[in-house]
Structures are given as C-alpha cells and as structure tokens.
Image (spheres, rainbow, N blue to C red):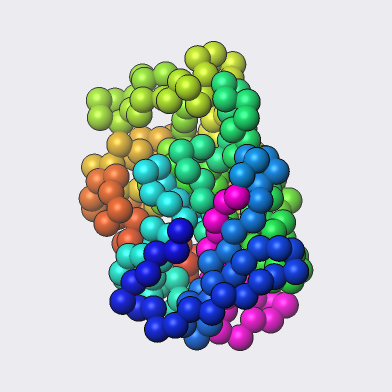
C-alpha cells in the first residue's frame, strides 16, 4: 500500500522488466517504491530505494534497516529524517523487516528474514544496476534494525565497507543479567529458548568478523541498549579493533534515531569515499 503525503506532487507507475512495479515520487524522481516476490518469505514484499541526484558507479550504497514496530517507510514519512536522507546524496535501500529481526528464525522455520535481506540487496542491485565494489557499500539500522545490521555484517563481512548502528541491541539475545533497566525481553517465539541458539544469534560473539571495517555505534545515556553497546565496544577494544561510540542524551526513542541519523550518514559518506 502506498502512503500518500502532502509532499507528493505526482506519481508515475513504471513496470520493470523483472515484473516489479516502481512508483516514482516527485522529489526529483529520486524516491522509488517497489515490490517483489520474496522466495524466502513466499509473498510480495515492499522496498523503498532512494537514488543519488546524479548516480555514478562510485555512488555510495547504504542498506538501512528499521526498528521493531516500524517499517521501511518510517524514516521517509518523518521529518527531518526524510530531508536528511535526500540530502545525503547516496543510494539508500530501505527494506521491510516486519518483526523478523533480520534472522532465519530457529523456531519459525518459514520466517527466513536473513535470506530475505539477501534477496532485497540482490533485487536492488539488479533493478538499479548497482555494481559498486563492497568498499562502496555500508549497512546500518536502528533498534531491532541496528541488531540486524551488525549481525548481518558479521555473517556477510565481505559485502560491506562500513558498519554502524543506532540504539542497536548489540549484545542480544542474552540472559537478563544486565543492570536494571538495561535488559530487553527476548521474543522466544522468534529466537527460541536455548542458550546455544542465542549465542549463535548474538553479534557480540562475532565481533572479530568485522575486523578492518570502520564501525560507528550510537546509543543514548538513558537508553536500555546503552550497556549492550558498551559491551560491544569493549569486545571491539579487546580485539584491538578501532571504532567510534557516541552516547547522545535521551532514551531508546525515535527522537534519538532522528538525532543519530545525520551522524551515521556523515560517517557512511566519509568511510566509503574512494
């Protein structure tokens, strides 16, 4: 379903060779709404793609994953994040992660959201001719999407030049042994109950796979994810891996995401520059 806003001047529906349909919003023809059939999820799924003003083979490509309870258009439908994304002048791929945590669930075997993310990236590459080398690709996300971005990067380190997360759950899933107010209830119907499964799904246990990549973590001083981010940062330090961690004022909120987004976009532009 397309969401119409006051920003919409006109809408052009274009059939693509793949059979998908793209809806081009009027802002310089740069915001594209597409859908494709996901073999991993066995249904039609939407994806938003923002194009640079003048795309070239050296244009940065950013995969941006949304948080729990949000969707692929949350940042596009909110101001000022929409303006910041357009001003970044890079390819931005916004996938619909639903409540799947961007993993192949060990419980709901039909919920293959990591495989689906593979499909999203492959689909965007094919539709827009994105042949950039991995050094020109970055991945980020917020909250659930921050978890998903970092975990996906540890699973596919060769695909990205830089990795970042905004208020991400980066030491998760785990037992609730963090300080009061710093834990998050593990969705057992998604992650299962076994500590062995949790260890495999927790990106904290795979920090070494990000070696050599620029890494940015953004958390907030009263956010429940702060200790998780500090744990992840400490694990990077233990591995002697350079990174940057920023602690903003605020809680685990969309307002903090809005404040973190320009920092992440600047970081991506700087670390993927040729």
Residue 41 screen position, x and y as percent: 63, 40
Quarter the C terminus occupies: bottom right
Does any portion of residue 216 appear in the rendered image? no
Quarter of the image where one finds residue 27: bottom left
Residue 56 is one of the magenta-drawn residues: yes
Q: Residue at x 30, y 53 (%)?
A: 254
Q: Residue at x 51, y 74 (%)?
A: 31
Q: Is 156 situated above or below 74? A: above
Which residues lie in the magenta part?
A: 44-61
Does any portion of residue 173 appear in the rendered image? yes
| Camera-side residue of 122 and 22 | 22
- The total number of labels drawn is 0
Residue 78 screen position, x and y as percent: 32, 65
| Camera-side residue of 203 and 41 | 41
Q: 135 left or right of 263?
A: right
| Camera-side residue of 2 and 148 | 2
Q: Residue at x 66, y 63 (%)?
A: 20
Quarter of the image where one finds residue 91: bottom right
Q: Residue at x 43, y 25 (%)?
A: 187
Residue 180 screen position, x and y as percent: 25, 25
Residue 52 is one of the magenta-drawn residues: yes
Residue 149 screen position, x and y as percent: 54, 47
Q: Is 99 situated above or below 95? A: above
Q: 85 left or right of 119?
A: left
């Amino acid at each position: 379903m397309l969401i119409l806003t006051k920003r919409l001047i006109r809408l052009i529906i274009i059939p693509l060779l793949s059979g998908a349909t793209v809806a081009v919003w009027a802002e310089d023809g740069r915001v594209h709404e597409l859908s494709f059939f996901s073999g991993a999820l066995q249904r039609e799924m939407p994806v938003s793609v923002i194009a640079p003003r003048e795309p070239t083979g050296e244009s940065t490509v950013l995969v941006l994953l949304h948080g729990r309870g949000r969707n692929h258009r949350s940042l596009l439908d909110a101001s000022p994040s929409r303006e910041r994304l357009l001003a970044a002048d890079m390819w931005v791929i916004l996938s619909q992660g639903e409540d799947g945590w961007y993993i192949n669930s060990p419980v709901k075997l039909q919920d293959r959201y990591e495989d689906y993310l593979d499909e999203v990236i492959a689909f965007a590459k094919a539709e827009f001719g994105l042949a950039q080398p991995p050094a020109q690709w970055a991945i980020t996300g917020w909250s659930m999407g921050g978890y998903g971005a970092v975990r996906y990067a540890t699973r596919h380190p060769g695909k990205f030049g830089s990795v970042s997360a905004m208020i991400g759950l980066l030491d998760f899933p785990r037992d609730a042994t963090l300080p009061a107010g710093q834990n998050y209830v593990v969705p057992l119907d998604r992650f299962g109950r076994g500590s062995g499964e949790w260890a495999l799904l927790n990106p904290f246990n795979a920090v070494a796979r990000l070696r050599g990549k620029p890494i940015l973590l953004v958390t907030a001083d009263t956010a429940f994810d702060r200790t998780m981010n500090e744990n992840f940062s400490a694990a990077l330090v233990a591995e002697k891996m350079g990174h940057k961690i920023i602690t903003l004022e605020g809680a685990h909120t969309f307002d903090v995401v809005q404040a973190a987004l320009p920092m992440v976009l600047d970081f991506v532009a700087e670390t993927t520059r040729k």
